[in-house]
Image (cartoon, rainbow, N blue to C red):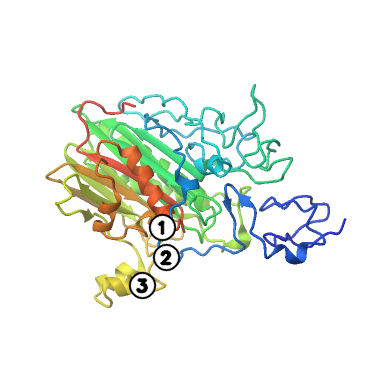
Amino acid sequence: MPRVATCPTCEEPLESGDNFCGVCGADLASAGPAAAVAADRPAPPVNGVARADWQEPEDYPLQAPAPAHPAAMSAPAAPDGPVAWDVPVTPDASAVPDASDAIPPAADPRAAAAFGEQPTPGAPGTPGTPGTPGTGTDTDASSGGGAGPRPAGGGRRLCAACREGTIDQDGYCDSCGHAQPRERDHMERELAGVAAASDRGLRHHRNEDAFAVSAAALPDGSPAVLAVVCDGVSSATRPDDASAAAAHAAGQSLLASLPRGAHPQQAMNEAIVAAAEAVNSLAAEAGRTGPHDEPHQRQQNAPACTIVSAVVAAGILTVGWIGDSRAYWVPDDRSAPPARLTEDDSWAAQMVAAGLMSEAEAYADERAHAITGWLGADAYELEPHTASYKPDRPGVVVVCTDGLWNYAESAQEMARAVPQDARARPMHSARVLVGHALDGGGHDNVTVAVLPFPAEPGRAGSG
C-alpha cells in the first residue's frame, strides 16, 4: 500500500507501519494515492469538533459573532439538579484518555450532539456538608465516569464517532481511529449558592481552564460560598495542569481559612499564595511529561495560569485575582448599574492606567491581551489583588476567564448576556454564558462561575 510521510489531514509526521494518525486519528489506509487532494477536504472531527490545520496562538483576534451552534448547545450536559463537587477524583486510567489532577467533569454534550444524540442525564450529585467540599459526581450515568458511552453490561467505552469500536488506553477508537472527547472538554458543577461551567471552545484542542466551587460555614454558622476560576497560559508547558493545581489549592485554602474566622480578604490573599505555590511546584517536577505534552507547539516555559476568585459571606463580596480573568457584579434590578470588580494585569490595562492610550485603542492593539501578572515559577513578584464590596441589593457575581469576557467585555455587555433569573438559576445562567461565548466564535476555552448574592441563609454546604 502506498505510504505518505505526513498525515494528509493534519500534516503530523508519520512512522513506518502507522495505520492511523496519532494526532487527529485519520485513517491512513486510504491516504496513499489521494494524499495530494486531501488538503482540500475538511478535517475529520476530533473530540466532536473539526480540527483545523494550524497551530494555536496564545490569543485570537475576535471576529463578528457567528450564527448559533445548535450542535454545541442544543443538548444540555445535565439537568438543573444539584451536582456537588470540589474533591479531585482519580479517574480510571483505562477509561479516560487524558487523566490529570482536574476535577472530573460532566460528559461533553457536543460529542453526542454531533452525532444526533442527546446525553443521558444522570442522578443529582451527593450533597456536601458544612465546612467540607462536595463529592464529585458524573452527570452522565451512561459514561461510567469517562467521556463516551459504554456497551451494555459494562466493559470498554464505545467510540463517540462510529459507535462500534471500543477505546484503547491512548484514547483512540480501535475501529475507526478517531480520538475521543477528553474529560475536561466540558465540565459543570453546582452547589446551593454557586454553579460553574467550563468548555474547551471551538478552536482549542483541549481545555486549559479549571475551576473550584464550594461552600463552608463561618464560625457563627452563616454560609460562605466560594468560586475559583483559573486559565492556563497556553504559551507555557502543562497549562492544564497549572490551572487545575491552582484552582484546587486556592479552594482548599479558602475552605480551611473561612471556618476559622479569617477575614475574607486575608483568606483570599492566602488562597492565591497557596495557588502560586502549587503551580510553582509543577516546575520543580524535573523531567515530568504527560501524554498530551506538545513541546513542538510551545516554548518550554514554566507552567503558568491566571486566577480569579470570589467569596460571598456575611453580606460581603470579596474578590481576588492575578492576571486577566475577571469578576463582574450584575444586580437583579437591571436599571441599576452593573460593575466590573477586577482590573486586568495586562498590557492594555497598563497603557490605559498610564494615560498613554484610551481603552478602545488599547484593547484594539494586538498586544492587548499580553498578561503582566500570572501564577508560575517564572512570574514576577507575586502581588495578589483583593477587594471587598457590600452591594446594597441582590444580584449575582460572574467570575470568568477571557474566553467569556472577550464576547461581553464591558459590565453592561455582561449584564445583557446574564439571564434575568440568574440568582434563582445559577447553573442555567452559567450554561447560557458558555453558550454566549460559543455562539460568538468560541476562540478560547471558556469558564464561568455564577454566585448569587447574598448567600442563602442556613444552606452552607448543602447540595
- Give the x, y percent position of residue 179: 65, 46
- Using residue 160 as the reference point, say whether residue 408 is left or right of it: left
Residue 282 point in image, percent of width and height: 51, 49
Query: What label does residue 364 carry, if any?
Result: 3
On residue 440, which mark appears? 1
Against 338, residue 129 (above or below) is above
* Screen quadrant of the N terminus: bottom right
- Inspect this view and state whether residue 143 appears: yes
Measured in 3D between alpha carbons, the distance from the residue under mark 3 to the one under mark 2, in whole angstroms, is 10 Å
- Foreground: 22 or 370? 22
The residue carrying mark 2 is 62
How far apart marks 1 and 3 lie (CA) works out to: 17 Å
Which of discs 1 and 3 lies nearer the camera? The answer is 1
Residue extending furthest left?
Answer: 392
Quarter occupied by the C terminus:
top left
Give whichever of 186, 240 is nearer the camera: 186
Q: Secondary structure at mark 2?
A: loop
